Image: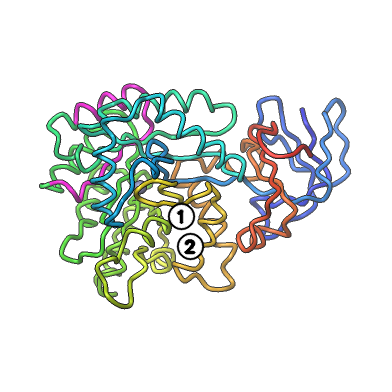
């Protein structure tokens, strides 16, 4: 057992950090939150020296198999179609070793900055077939003692049209992929394609996370099809619509009707500010839109909204350090959160993604959760989003996995 003492702890049960000691069992889970100065015989004592302990950051949406390919895959058009075309031309030439190497560099960067779990969409299409899935399953295994990777079997634009699509999805899920994913709005028959996804999810008992309507064209809107199927399959609370950008282009009344449906079906939304700001709105010659979904309207209606990295240094997003606090900060600015809502932005990289990734019971500073946390000199969670301290120590399962010792 280990007793982490002398820290300022942001417990799940409190609004602000408080002095608490944390007892962690041999299984890497929190056994007790104790008053400061408690003694526990036989426990190894670790002094936190007044530093702030918050839950580890959760990245609900990345593309680790594309990470760090920018130098080989430029995107001169700068928009989503340009990025997809550039990457698929390159994808046939990638090797599994290269995919693993790039993914691991990014995972290491994310871990150093406080991320303890990443849900990665992994391309399945005519170019990659199942190679990238195999790469990320191997990476998931190698990092399992430091960071949790969830692999989304992601039928991309090319995969959507391939006749082998459904079979590839089955193979990926049988091999151990955690989640069913795709870009259904790029299918010729969106409803029929969504049926394929829900059938696969049902067969394998997996949740669904789709890239939905990552565009601003109000003549192509597909939320109703997702809502209907989520309710019909009893998948409430197990479906995520990533991006959902077009919601912000729709008139408020129509967007409100859809948002009410998403709330009713308990469909979560992940907003990806980096990709949306970079890729969307390039055809406008003035007042360029931000391209993010209606983050505030969704939250007000009770929809769980997380923010996440999406792409890191590839043709979809040329930048990215792997710092989720930076993404929370951009969400604050680009989604127009109120100036008093820094804590809500922090929830969007911790509590909210925990719910969407099925990690709610495991995550947070509470008895029974895994001891996955971030230690800094920040004042509180609001200060973390506002200023993002440089010195960070990361604990996973009660063991220090990045940053200087306590
Ligand atoms: Zn994505």
Q: Of marks 1 and 2, which one's residue comes earlier in the chain?
A: 1
Task: Report, in whole angstroms, how far the alpha carbon at label 1 lies from the one at label 2.
Answer: 7 Å
Residue 269 % position (x, y): 38, 54
Callout 1 touching callout 2 (CB < 8 Å): yes
Name the residue beneath numbered marker 2. 331
Residue 140 % position (x, y): 47, 28
Residue 290 % position (x, y): 37, 68
Residue at 31% of width from left, 51% of height from top? 75
Image quadrant in which you'd find residue 282? bottom left
Residue that sits furthest to the bottom in the current view: 286
Q: Which of 52 and 88 is in front in this view?
A: 88
Residue 205 % position (x, y): 33, 31
Left/right placement of residue 69 relative to residue 283 reads right
Disc 2 within 8 angstroms of ligand 1 (CB)? no
Does the magenta segment cover residue 185? yes
Q: Label 1: few (<14), some or many (≥20) within 10 Å?
A: many
Residue at 85% of width from left, 25% of height from top? 42
Q: Label 2: few (<14), some or many (≥20) within 10 Å?
A: many
Which residues are the magenta region? 166-187
Left/right placement of residue 15 relative to residue 327 reads right
User: In the displayed structure, would residue 335 be above or below residue 23?
Assistant: below
Residue at 57% of width from left, 57% of height from top? 346
Q: Nearer the viewer, residue 31 or 118?
A: 118
Does the magenta segment cover residue 276? no
Q: Quadrant of the C terminus?
A: top right
Image quadrant in which you'd find residue 174? top left
Name the residue beneath numbered marker 1. 307
Q: In which quarter of the image is the N terminus?
A: top right
Left/right placement of residue 338 relative to residue 158 reads right
Q: Residue 142 carries which label?
A: none
């Amino acid at each position: 057992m280990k007793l982490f003492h002398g820290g300022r702890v942001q417990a799940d049960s409190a609004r602000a950090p408080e002095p608490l000691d944390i007892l962690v069992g041999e299984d890497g889970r929190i056994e007790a939150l104790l008053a400061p100065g408690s003694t526990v015989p036989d426990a190894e004592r670790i002094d936190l020296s007044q530093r702030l302990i918050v839950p580890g950051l959760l990245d609900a949406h990345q593309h680790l198999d594309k990470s760090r390919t920018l130098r080989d895959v430029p995107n001169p058009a700068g928009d989503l179609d340009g990025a997809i075309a550039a990457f698929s031309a390159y994808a046939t030439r990638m090797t599994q070793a290269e995919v693993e190497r790039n993914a691991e560099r990014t995972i290491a960067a994310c871990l150093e900055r406080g991320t303890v779990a990443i849900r990665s969409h992994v391309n399945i299409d005519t170019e990659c077939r199942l190679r990238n899935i195999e790469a990320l399953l191997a990476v998931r295994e190698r990092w399992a003692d430091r960071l949790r990777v969830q692999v989304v079997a992601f039928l991309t634009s090319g995969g959507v049209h391939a006749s082998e699509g459904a079979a590839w999805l089955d193979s990926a899920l049988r091999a151990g992929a955690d989640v069913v994913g795709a870009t259904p709005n790029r299918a010729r028959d969106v409803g029929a394609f969504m049926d394929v996804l829900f059938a696969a999810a049902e067969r394998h008992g997996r949740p669904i996370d789709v890239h939905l309507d990552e565009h601003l064209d109000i003549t192509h809107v597909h939320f109703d099809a997702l809502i209907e199927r989520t309710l019909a399959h009893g998948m409430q609370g197990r479906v995520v619509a990533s991006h959902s950008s077009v919601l912000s282009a729709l008139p408020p009344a129509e967007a409100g009707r859809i948002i009410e449906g998403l709330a009713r079906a308990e469909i979560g939304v992940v907003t990806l500010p980096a990709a949306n700001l970079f890729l969307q709105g390039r055809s406008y010659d003035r007042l360029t839109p931000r391209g993010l979904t209606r983050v505030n309207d969704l939250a007000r209606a009770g929809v769980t909204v997380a923010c996440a990295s999406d792409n890191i240094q590839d043709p979809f997003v040329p930048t990215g350090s792997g710092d989720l606090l930076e993404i929370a900060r951009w969400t604050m600015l680009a989604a127009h959160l109120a100036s008093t809502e820094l804590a809500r932005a922090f929830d969007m990289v911790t509590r909210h993604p925990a719910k969407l990734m099925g990690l709610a019971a495991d995550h947070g500073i509470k008895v029974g959760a895994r001891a996955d946390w971030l230690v800094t000199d920040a004042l509180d969670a609001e200060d973390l989003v506002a200023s993002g301290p440089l010195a960070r120590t990361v604990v996973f399962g009660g063991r220090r996995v990045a940053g200087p010792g306590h």
